[in-house]
Image (cartoon, rainbow, N blue to C red):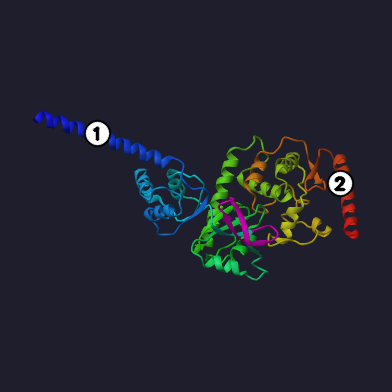
Amino acid sequence: MWRHIASNALTFFVILVFLVGGGIIWAQREYETAGPLSEAICLEVPRGSNMSRVSEDLAEQGAVTSATLLRLGADYSDKTQSLKAGSYLVPENASMAEIVDIVTRGGASTCGTEVIYRIGVNSAEVEVRELDPTTGRFEDMAEFDPAADEVPEEYTRVREASDTRYRVALAEGVTSWQVVEELRSVDVLEGEVEVPEEGSLAPNSYEVAPGDSRADLIDRMQRAQEVILSEAWANRAPDLPLTGPEEALVLASIVEKETGVAEERPQVASVFVNRLRRGMRLQTDPTVIYGITEGQGVLGRGIRQSELRQATPYNTYVIEGLPPTPIANPGRAAIEAALNPAETQYVFFVADGTGGHAFAETLDEHNENVARWRQIEAEQGEDTQAN
């Protein structure tokens, strides 16, 4: 009899193991298979929320078939405690595993309403926009100049919302003074800040939160620029006429201000590198302008002949070599171009009427390019008068 009972118990145990194993395999397959979501949604994870609340919200929105299974999967993968507050784009047919990864991996929010404080070379702008999860495209809700325009109601409304995201975006070529002046008008930031060294800030987009310190944000920008410069210097071309990373940053800032055409940067850099190698003066207008404005705003007029003759530390028509400091905050591409310039014999360039430049190896070629540019300027002036 005991042998019969033992045999039945063993049979029951085998069946139980089989059922449990099958259940685990089913649960894993269900957790990793495509979900029921027919179109993308924007999932909001409030501060202080937990995986239980998020899973219930997802089930209510039809994004998952089982809130319990999502919680168990998050627990099993040790991601429950890694939940990050924010607004996240959950794509159609996202599996539970993919959703858990989206809400726990960190980084910037990927949908919802965001306010971008854009700091440009010639102006600043505040942009309010919202991501449409069904199209994956941002739609502008409001744009205004914080110094000149009245604050729109839409901005006030989203500022009062708890799930609004904020970013500060620096354009390549802005000066440190411009950055600090505009940060003072960003009302989600707090505290005073001194103007940092020219060139020390990395143009990029930085996510911020209400109550963040302006000084801390500047520190983030400086650390980012240090990393970029260090990496570019380590991978520089051989035999450059530069004594160190500091001079590379100066050259990169000149390249940044001389061209707005991305693919031209290595060629522009080659002109200045070739001039430095030959002992030629750089003769670049942006340095002269910086000597006049000290980086505090836009000159707003042409350079006078007296200013081209005036001996200042930034007048590269007069001084030998590079100016003493950068003249703006260059981006990664300009820094990399300065340290890996194109291999050319160019020592001249002038505008070509298309937004780019015509390059030349000899003065005769350059004079021909200048004559063509003068003709284009004259024709454009005639067209303006005709209109």
Q: Position of residue 265 (x, y in %)?
A: 71, 43
Q: Is residue 19 above or below residue 252?
A: above
- Mark 2–mark 1 distance (CA, rounded to whole Å): 89 Å
Question: Of tags 2 and 1, which is closer to the observer?
Answer: 1
Residue under pointer 1? 15
Q: Is residue 363 left or right of residue 5?
A: right
Residue under pointer 2? 370
Q: Position of residue 387 (x, y in %)?
A: 88, 60
> Label 2 neighbourhood size at 10 Å, few (<14), some (14-19), many (20+)?
some
Q: Which image quarter: residue 307?
A: bottom right
Label 1's element?
Answer: helix
The answer to whether residue 114 shows anywhere in this view is yes
> Label 1 neighbourhood size at 10 Å, few (<14), some (14-19), many (20+)?
few
Identify which amino acid the numbered label 1 is placed on. Ile
Q: Position of residue 123 (x, y in %)?
A: 69, 61
Q: Residue at x 70, y 59 (%)?
A: 122
Toward the viewer: 337 or 93?
Answer: 93
Identify which amino acid the numbered label 2 is placed on. Val
Q: Is residue 221 left or right of residue 106?
A: right
Q: Indicate whether residue 138 is drawn in magenta.
A: yes
Q: Which residues are magenta?
A: 119-141
Name the mark on residue 361: none
Q: Residue at x 33, y 38 (%)?
A: 24
Q: Main secondary structure of the magenta part?
A: strand
The answer to whether residue 177 shows anywhere in this view is no
Q: How many marks?
A: 2
